[in-house]
Amino acid sequence: MDEILRDEYVQNVLQKKARLVKIDVNGDGVAKGGKTTQELIKAYKVKGVPTIVFIDSGGKEFLRIPGLLSKEDFKSLICKFIEGERGCYENR
C-alpha cells in the first residue's frame, strides 16, 4: 500500500483533496486530535489492514477501501470519488 501512496498521480490527487492520516494498528500512540490508536480503530471500524477510509470535510465517510487493491484499481477509485469522472483519466 505504501508504494501506491507514493505514486506521483496518487499523491497529487490526495494533496489537492485530502489529508492522509496513517494509523499504526500495532501501536499505542496518540494521533492528532488526542485520540489513541485504539480509539481511532474503533471510531472508524477498522476490521483489518490495510483499510483506507475517506472522510469529507463534514466528517462523513464517503469511501472505504478494505484490503489491498492494485495501483490501477486504486487510481480508478480515487478518480471516481475524489476527482470525479470528468477529466481524471487525462491526468493519469
Image (cartoon, rainbow, N blue to C red):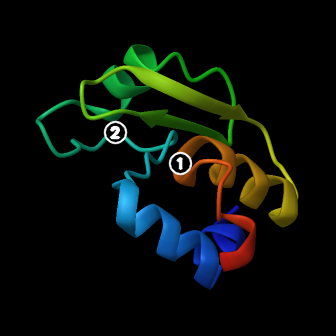
Q: Position of residue 48 (x, y in %)?
A: 69, 29
Kindly identify which numbered label has been placed on residue 28.
Answer: 2
> Which quadrant would the N terminus be assigned to in this image?
bottom right
Local packing at callout 1 (Cα closer than 10 Å; few below 14, some 14-19, many 20+) is some
Residue positioned 48% across, 37% down in the render: 54
Local packing at callout 2 (Cα closer than 10 Å; few below 14, some 14-19, many 20+) is few
As displayed, is residue 25 above or below residue 63?
below
Q: Residue furthest bottom?
A: 8
Q: Position of residue 76 (x, y in %)?
A: 78, 54
**Amino acid carrying mark 2 in the image:** Asp
In front: 42, or 76? 76
**Dot 2: element:** loop
As displayed, is residue 17 above or below residue 8?
above
Q: Position of residue 69 (x, y in %)?
A: 84, 50
Q: Is residue 46 left or right of residue 43?
A: right
**Amino acid carrying mark 1 in the image:** Ile
Query: In this figure, which residue is indicated by the disc labeled 1?
Result: 82
